[in-house]
Amino acid sequence: MIDYDKWKRLRTRANPFTWLPKDFLNPHFESIGTSQLIEEENLPDYVATQYYPVRIGEVLASRYQVVGKLGFGTTSTVWMARDLMGRRHVALKIFIHSGSLGCEPSHELSVYQRLDQGPASHPGRQAVRALLDSFTISGPNGVHQCLVHPPLWDSMETFLARNPEGRLPTPVLAVMLRQVFLALDYAHQCRVVHTDIKASNIMFGIEDTTVLEKFEQVELEHPTPRKEIDGRIIYLSRKLDIPTGQGFGLPVLCDFGSAAWGEEKHEEDVQPDVYRSPEVILGVPWSYEVDIWNVGCMVWDLFEGGHLFYGNDPEHGTYRGRAHLAEIISLLGPPPPGFVAQGTLRSKFFSEQGEFQAGIEIPPHVSLEQLETNLQGSDKTLFLQFMCKMLQWDPKNRQMAKQLLEDEWLKKHT
């Protein structure tokens, strides 16, 4: 239970500007049956005891009062909270406990701490999600790392789903890309490689704080549906309203949990399957350039409404690196021999003479120009030139974020 008298004393004596906790004990909520799986329970490897049993209304770290659930994932849940000491709303990312297999929340904290040390004057600093605070809490099954961020609105993925055409309009795509390249230029200067750039990791900022206040008020008046099982409450997530007028902030790059250190050479497998760069598939040591290939593939998704590469292997019925490489060859032609020679996995896919021999046929050649169907004339030409600056076999031939910010097509639409 919250000691409201204690908070009143704190406000009057220590800090007259703190918020008092609110009572979120409204009993008029919808109860969901225990047999119905909801939210994180539907994840393939869900283990209830790995998650901290958050309760709406509780105060964490003697400062952050939980208001409602914003989302969930395999390693964390995300909550709206009232920062009682700062008189603002924040987003809390609460990781599964530190003893869980494969959970390394301290790495993401280290990444944000490094990003915080970058040059304050760099325009890309505002294009990276800020870390306001961090703390740990003890749950019944272990210790949980918590990150405190400014609240953000929908992801680019959710925004895209609202469009019946299934693709982003050119002005929205261009503004988003400008922000992503600013964020990457900043991150790369801080020696951070993101490795996992996708529409769900790019989110709109919020300038209209009334949507945060309304989120809170709706929870007070109409509590979130929930289920209780074994003394643990699982809540449904609640969506933020659409900001009005100029209430949208610029997109920011989020989720650095898979980030790698740029000063090191890497050979580990990273990136979502359909965005894997040639160097990752072939085992060529990689660094910052994987982010650029990743962005190029994502641009195609968002603008053309479908993946550029799928990697579906007809023999196995699932993604395989050989199918992905065959598709890249179909689009870009054969890879440079010198590039292939650097790969520790090259013998799985290529002969000593550099011929593709992975036991799968290369699809008929197709060009980006043939695949692109939304643009005409000079705008199409400029867009394809822009894409080709990112989609290069050899990482050394890809333009980096700072160069891409000067691209003619991008500048034309921003």
Image: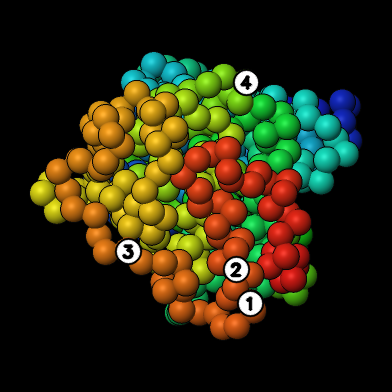
Q: Nearer the viewer, mark 4 or mark 1?
A: 1
For the residue labelled by badge 3, is the local secondary structure a helix, a strand or a loop?
Answer: loop
Residue 386 percent coordinates (x, y) = 61, 61
Tell me if label 3 and label 4 are in contact, CB under 8 Å.
Answer: no
Q: CA distance from mark 3 to mark 4?
A: 37 Å
Sequence-earlier tag: 4 or 2: 4
Q: Quadrant of the C terminus?
A: bottom right
Q: Which residue is mark 2?
A: 383
Q: Specify few, some or many for label 1: CA neighbours under 10 Å numbering under 14, 14-19, or 20 or more.
A: few
Tell me if label 2 and label 1 are in contact, CB under 8 Å.
Answer: yes
Q: Specify few, some or many for label 4: CA neighbours under 10 Å numbering under 14, 14-19, or 20 or more.
A: few
Q: CA distance from mark 1 to mark 3?
A: 24 Å
Residue 340 percent coordinates (x, y) = 38, 34
Q: CA distance from mark 3 to mark 2?
A: 20 Å
Q: CA distance from mark 2 to mark 1?
A: 6 Å
Q: Which residue is mark 3?
A: 365
Q: Which residue is mark 4?
A: 263
Q: Specify few, some or many for label 3: CA neighbours under 10 Å numbering under 14, 14-19, or 20 or more.
A: few
User: On screen, 8 above or below 123?
Assistant: above
User: On screen, 267 above or below 382?
Assistant: above
Residue drawn 42% across the image and 48% down it: 275
Identify which amino acid the numbered label 3 is placed on: His
Residue 99 percent coordinates (x, y) = 39, 16
Residue 409 percent coordinates (x, y) = 68, 67
